[in-house]
Image (spheres, rainbow, N blue to C red):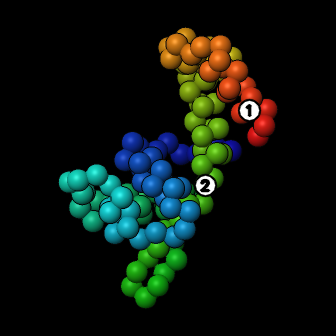
Amino acid sequence: MKYPKLTKAEEEIMQLLWRAKEPTTVSQLIEQMPEPHPPHSTISSIVRILEGKGFVDHKTYGRTHAYYTTVDKKDYTRFSLRKLAGNYFQGSMNDLVSFLVKENDLSLKDLSEIIEKLENE
């Protein structure tokens, strides 16, 4: 599946919504953000943009909207990694992983643990 590009602010809101696991109001999102909190109108606008892009939907309770994700985090992560590999590593996931291993100076023990986790999923 192909997704529209998200801005850094949109991705930040998506991370909060994915963590919430239940419909969340704009005020609840703001409470989770570091001080100084952004204006309610700013976060509300970002959430509406995400809704327009198809990442978010809402339930209405009187005059209150509670937002929830319509895109699975794992699906978006997979899409993002494939796009990263395509843009910077000629589409090679092996080259991407090799780069990450070298840049993060992972030990054989670290790699073994990662492989074990992958095999157990």
Please provide percent x and percent y for residue 20: 50, 61
Mark 2 neighbour class, 10 Å CA radius: few under 14, some 14 to 19, many 20 or more: some
Farthest residue in the front direction?
A: 109
Mark 1 and mark 2: Cα distance apart in space: 22 Å
Q: In the rendered structure, are the residues bearing label 1 and label 2 in contact, judged by CB atoms less than 8 Å apart?
A: no
Q: Nearer the viewer, mark 1 or mark 2?
A: 1
Name the residue tied to disc 2: 71
Foreground of the two, 16 or 51 = 16
Instruction: Tell me: residue 14, above or below residue 77.
Output: below
Please provide percent x and percent y for residue 87: 55, 23
Mark 1 neighbour class, 10 Å CA radius: few under 14, some 14 to 19, many 20 or more: few
Instruction: Of the two numbered discs 1 and 2 on the same chain, state the one appearing first in sequence.
Output: 2
Foreground of the two, 65 or 51 = 65
Instruction: Tell me: residue 68, above or below residue 46.
Output: below
Q: Residue at x 39, y 42 (%)?
A: 8
Q: Residue at x 45, y 46 (%)?
A: 11
Residue type (three-letter) at the residue carrying disc 2: Val
Q: Assign the N terminus to one quadrant of the image.
A: top right
Please provide percent x and percent y for residue 33: 32, 55
